[in-house]
Image (cartoon, rainbow, N blue to C red):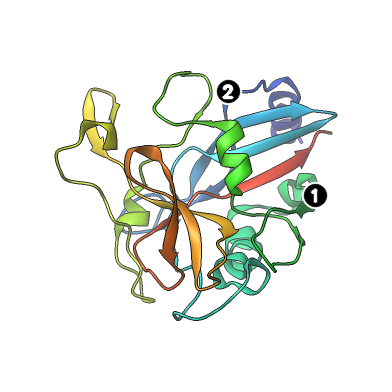
Amino acid sequence: MEHDNLVFTTLRSAQPGELITFGTYPQTADGADRAPIKWRVLQHTDGELFLLSEYILDSKRYYRENADITWRDSDVRTWLNDEFYNAAFNDTEKRLIKTTHCTDNGEDSADTEDKVFLLSVAEAQELTDKLGAAPLRAQRGATGTEFAKIKKSDGCNLYVYDKSVKDNYIIEDGEELGCSWWWLRTQTSHSSRAYFVGTRSSIRSYGNVNLACYGVRPSLKINLP
């Protein structure tokens, strides 16, 4: 109970741009750990926190094959709201997670009700900074955990940039780390593709839904106790 009260106090005082921890997920290469998930606070409004994971936590296909699909029926949405949701959060944490009405899912893609979701194009444009101009906001450029980088049984493993354009790197604790690309939920007019964050933190529109090298930065909203 004392731990829960500390968590509630931390959440209530969290301000946009701050990092908080909430839930746990494997982050080392062997996947044996249960490390706290770091989230960047995107918004604090009306008794609610809007959070984006600071790191890419895993690598998943948007959909299992190169086919016409919608966010509503995508594999990554199912994974976020089932396997990830149940692995990352305990019962106390789940009671705080709001069911979010998700729009801007793409042409001919119905609105959805999600516990955990990917950012839309509009949310990424509004709530993240492209090249780190505002250090206290969420950065669009992101790196993945060691767990995200290892190849999984479904064949997915995170692409890590290793070329010469410096805007595709992040300096963390004095180390230069290659960024990775991560999915957005919005789809293009071609429903076998989805938007993603790519080179130089730009928002790109040509991600084939069955690509196995893009990452997942979960988002969610919390009802403040």
Q: In this view, does 23 lie above or below 50?
A: below
Residue bearing mark 1: 95
Point out residue 183 in the picture as x, y percentages from the top left corner: 48, 55
Is residue 59 visible to the viewer in this orientation of the structure? Answer: no
Mark identifier at residue 218: none
- Quadrant of res 140: top left
Which of the two residues, 58 or 201, is positioned nearer the viewer here?
201
Point out residue 59 in the picture as x, y percentages from the top left corner: 41, 60
Q: In this view, which residue lies farthest toward the left?
A: 164
Specify few, some or many for label 1: CA neighbours under 10 Å numbering under 14, 14-19, or 20 or more: few
Left or right: 221, with 137 as reference point: right
Residue bearing mark 2: 17
Image quadrant occupied by the C terminus: top right
At horizontal 53% and vertical 70% (from top left) the residue drawn is 190
Which of the two residues, 104 or 182, is positioned nearer the viewer here?
104
* CA distance separating discs 2 and 1: 24 Å
Left or right: 134, with 214 as reference point: right
Q: Is mark 1 on a helix, strand or loop?
A: helix
Point out residue 70 in the picture as x, y percentages from the top left corner: 63, 71
- Quadrant of res 157: bottom left
Image quadrant occupied by the N terminus: top right
Q: In this view, does 217 lie above or below 82?
A: above
- Residue type, label 2: Gly
Task: Find out whether the residues at labels 2 and 1 contact each other: C-beta distance under 8 Å.
Answer: no
Point out residue 210 in the picture as x, y percentages from the top left corner: 42, 73
- Residue type, label 1: Arg
At horizontal 50% and vertical 49% (from top left) the residue drawn is 217
Lower position in the chain sequence, tag 2 or tag 1: 2
Left or right: 117, with 145 as reference point: right
Specify few, some or many for label 2: CA neighbours under 10 Å numbering under 14, 14-19, or 20 or more: many
